[in-house]
Amino acid sequence: MNEKENLELLLPALKEVISGLGIDAEIIVADGGSTDGTPDAAATRGARVVPQIERGYGGALLAGFAASRAPYVITMDADLSHRPVVLEELWRHRHDGDVVIASRYVPSGEADVGGFRRLLSRVLNVTYSRALSLPVKDLSSGFRLYRRNILQGILLQSRDFDALEEILIRIHADGWQVHEVPFRYMSRGSGKSHARLLKFGWSYLKTLVRMWQLRNSVASADYDYRAFDSPIWLQRYWQRKRHEIVLDFVRGKKAILDIGCGTSRIIVDLPAAVGLDVAFRKLRWLRPLHRRVVQATCDTLPFPDDSFDAVINSEVIEHVADDAAILGEMYRILRPGGTLVLGTPDYSRRLWLVLEWIYGKVMPGAYAHEHITHFTRRTLHQRLVESGFEVLDCRYVGYCEMIFRARRP
């Protein structure tokens, strides 16, 4: 928006850096209705100008994304605050993450701005990072490299500067990896900033609330992993007690399959095990921590007969329709003498009914509404015996979640 003077300096420098990298690249300028000759200045210097249809900084990003066709997309501001030479560092680290951020707040990064603006930026980033449990230092940097495929399908609601945070949080929730490299943010060249403090703050607050709901829902790929260290005592206890019982039941077993592994600490702490889940975003997030993963459903397991010494199926069967094929498949892939660890809520316990109701109210985006099949200890014990298993033990988490240990004869 009215950045003619800055673009006259930026675009030649940008083309020089691109040439030095030896890559083919297109420069796209998203214009928000400039009146100072910005479109002509950009076009005469080899850029493709696309009109911004939707309002705000977010609208500009959407226009640029829609116009891009390359496998990588770098976004930067047109006001000279993002120096073109930093493209070299972003490009060098393109294999270190699905998004690479030029960050002011990692070691060796800095911001050449006034004290008040620096304070606001710090408060914003610390608030978002801590409230949303994100391992990112600079969420508000617009200088980024994206793999273009990760941008497809993102439903962006924000249209102001908070679009930067929403994009990053949604990408992280889909299981993609984020990497930061240091850079020095410079004061803009000519002209004045288009940010408005009150509007800016209100937009960020609304987006923070929406993103908190996303981060604390099962739509977030690392939901299971973070629950282990949840600030909510009951949730933390539940995860850790389940972890303790399951690992005790499979102790000494070598070939282990964890069905419905999600991103829980159970699969992370069983490095030789195979993790299986239907949610690809969770497996994508898990891959850097645990390489042996496969996407499949529990009623058609993609393994030969007699493949495993132990099979874990924890908190899965209540999410799917009651089907004898699920237990039959686990029996099939277990070796004779192998152990089945099967966990699910006990719906004969009144305490569970109360806790599930509270859980659904406090954490409406969590798992409670997905429980469609209800077992009791008696009915599940009977199903195991009917499927040919010998029931050896049953322990409880919080007096409500039953975890069976059974054996294939």
Image: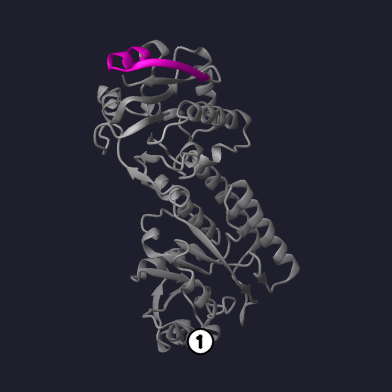
Quadrant position of the C terminus in the picture: top left
Closer to us: 6 or 98: 98
Left or right of 310? Residue 60 is right
Closer to us: 361 or 302: 302
Position of residue 320 measured from the top left corner of the image (x, y, whole percent): 33, 28
Position of residue 236 measured from the top left corner of the image (x, y, whole percent): 59, 32
The residue carrying mark 1 is 13
Q: Is mark 1 on a helix, strand or loop?
A: helix
Region rendered in magenta: 380-396
Left or right of 107? Residue 367 is left
- Say whether residue 371 is magenta: no
Q: At 32% from the left edge and 14% from the top edge, which residue is drawn?
A: 385
* Residue 167 visible: yes
Type of colouring: one colour
Position of residue 66 measured from the top left corner of the image (x, y, whole percent): 36, 66
* Residue 53 visible: no
Left or right of 138? Residue 337 is left
Q: Which amino acid does label 1 sit on?
A: Ala
Closer to us: 289 or 278: 289
